[in-house]
Every structure is written in structure tokens, then in C-alpha cells.
Image (cartoon, rainbow, N blue to C red):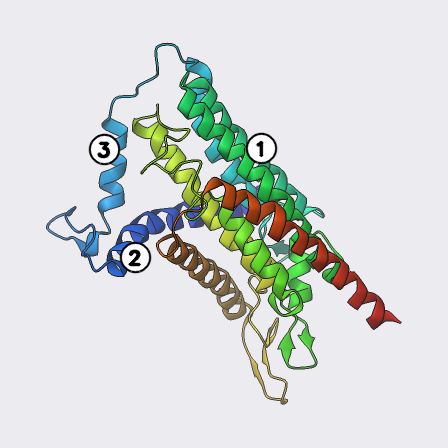
Amino acid sequence: MEYLIQFGKAFFMFNFVMGLVYVLSWMERKQSALMQDRIGANRAEIFGLRVMGLFHPIADAIKMLTKEDFIPPEGHRLIHTLAPFLALFFAIISAAVIPFGGIYQFGDYRVSFQILNLDVGILYVFAMMSIGIYGFVLAGWSSHNNYSLLGGLRASSQMLSYEITMGATVIGIIMVYGTLDLQEMIFAQGRLLGGWLPRWGVILQPLGFFLFATAAMAETKRTPFDIPEAESEIIGYFTEYSGMKFGLFMTSDFVETVISSAMIITLFFGGWQVPYLQAGGWVFPWGTSWPLSQTAVMLLQVGAFIGKTFFFCFVLLLVRWTLPRFRWDQLVKLGWKIMLPLSIANILVTGLVILLLRS
């Protein structure tokens, strides 16, 4: 039974991530079209139905699966083939520790809606996302193309510039909640501050939220941080890729967007928590209560996780189609000279406030 429960949680999370990737690949076209006063993709149809272009991702997948798989004659065939799988694999498995619901009692089983219950869940996410960069670096190296290699090096340099800031930003959250366990962190955010406000990370660490969100956008290599790809002017790491291998790189970008959004809500917006919703139902600060069944509470909390994640995916796409691309010197300066000092200052201020409150 335990194996069945684990399979069910993994099945839900995988389909949630990949389903949202499908929607995002459609949203990116439609959202940019609306912002630029265009119609957007609307030609693909099934049985005469177009549904606002929602079938275009299926047409794209068929096109990529049927295109020729080209490997440069002097490239490294094995590494060239493995690189996109590495990039996508580590992006997907980083979702294993992200809680998509609370802890519920089903008969004799107490089930936590989290695939892996790790005490160091934050470190796991950072480790998996960091290893995933090898897929992009190896893609550039194995293509035997100097421009592709430079694209891979830009990707690794950008990851290094913003991963440090992201890690330093998370330290403030860890100091506030006193745990590396993402599920415990969400439970801590469910408590009320002053009897009214939820103890969400965005309230206790507002600077940390903006720094983490910016670093997360840089980690996804999306505009305005898309210099490693920048296919409009600069040759990126996937220049020598075609067909479904290219599609895997594109999919990994969307998966990273979903994971980044899920981590933002987990650390700063209460994850699956809904303000004033407890295990027995609604309990409001002014004394009113509204009991609910466990099933209703579970559906509301899982729905909150899905809705919050979708909202921040929308925000990340909004930023992508609003801001122009940074120059390389601007990107590095932002990471090392502005965001990193601010994240260190955030740690010092957080520690000082904690000491003052305890004294």
C-alpha cells in the first residue's frame, strides 16, 4: 500500500509539472500575442476545433518527433545525445521534495502530500538544479562548435552568478522558520502573525522574496536573462540540435519555470496553505468558524498550490515579454555587485532582528 501511495504522489506531481509545461508552451504564444496586439497561434485543429490554438503544442511535438535528428560529424555522439536528457531529468526530479498538500489521514495511513520527505529539502532542490546545468554545458561542448561552447559557458557562468545569491537569500528564510524541511516551513507559515496575518515569507522577508524571484528568473535562462540562448542574435548551446532533442531543451526551460514558481510560493507564499483554513475547516480571527470535511480541506489546499504556482508562472512569462535582454556586463554586475551584497545584508538584518526579539 505504501508503494501505491508513493506512486500516486509521483504520478500526480509529474503530470502536474508536465501538464503545466504544456499550458505554458501555449500561454507563451498567446500571452505575447495579446501584449503585442497579435492573434497568436490559432491554426492547429482537431475535428475542426481550434480552441484558441490550444492544440498547437501537440502539433509542435509531432513536428519535432518527425524532424531529422542531426549530430555534427565531429561532435561527440554519446554526450550530444545524453545532454538534453540530463538537463530535463534533473529539472523534473527536483520537484520530488516540493509539498503540494498537507498531511492527511486515510484509514490507517498518515499521508504527506510530498514525494520525498527530506529534512534538507531546500538543499536537495539546489543540488538537482545545479547538476542540471551540466546538460547545457555538455551540449555546447559535444557539438564541436565554438559558438555552442560559448553558449554553454555563458549558461554555467550565469548559474554561478545567481545560484550564490539564491542560496544566500534562502538563509534568511531558514533563520526565520528554523528548518530546512519544506513541509515544516509551510506549516510554520500557516501560523498567524499578530492573530491576523499569516506568517508568509513575503511578509517576514520582503527583500528576500524579490532577490529570490529575480535569481529564479536568471536560473531559468529566460528573458531578460536569456543570454545563454538568445537565439535572435547570439548562437546558443543548442545550435547544433534539432528534432526532439531541441524539444527537450525547450521543455527543460518550461519545467524550470514551473519549479521556480513552486519554490517561490513554497518559501514566500505559504505553499498549499490557505489563510484561516485549518485541518477542521475555516477558523477566522474574529471567532467565526466553518467546519469542513477532510476531503474539502484537502481539495482547497491542493487547489491553492496549483493556483499559486500557475499565477507565478504567468508572472514569469509576463516579465519575459516585458523587459529587454540584459547585456552580459549588466547581467554579471546585477548578480555580483547588487544582488549578492543585498542578500548578505538581508542575512545580517534578519539575524539582528531575531536577536532583538529574543532579548
Q: Residue furthest front?
A: 329
Residue at the (49%, 65%) spot, across then down: 304
- Residue at x 34%, y 25% (from the top left corner): 241
The amino acid marked with disc number 2 is Gln
Q: Secondary structure at mark 2?
A: helix
Tag 3 near tag 2, CB within 8 Å: no
Residue 85 can be seen in this image? no
Residue bearing the label numbered 3: 63
In the picture, the disc for residue 31 is 2
Q: CA distance from mark 3 to mark 2?
A: 22 Å
**Residue 102 position within the rendered picture, expressed as x and y whole percent measured from the top left:** 60, 61
Task: Indicate left or right for 214 with 64 as reference.
Answer: right
Looking at the image, the residue that sits furthest to the right is: 359
Q: Label 1 sits on what residue type?
A: Ile
Q: Which residue is mark 1?
A: 131
Which residue appears at 59% of the width and 36% of the height?
130
Image quarter where the N terminus lies is: top right
Q: CB of mark 1 within 8 Å of CB of mark 2?
A: no
Residue 109 left/right relative to 13: right
Q: Nearer the viewer, residue 163 or 263?
A: 163
Residue 246 found in image quarter: top left
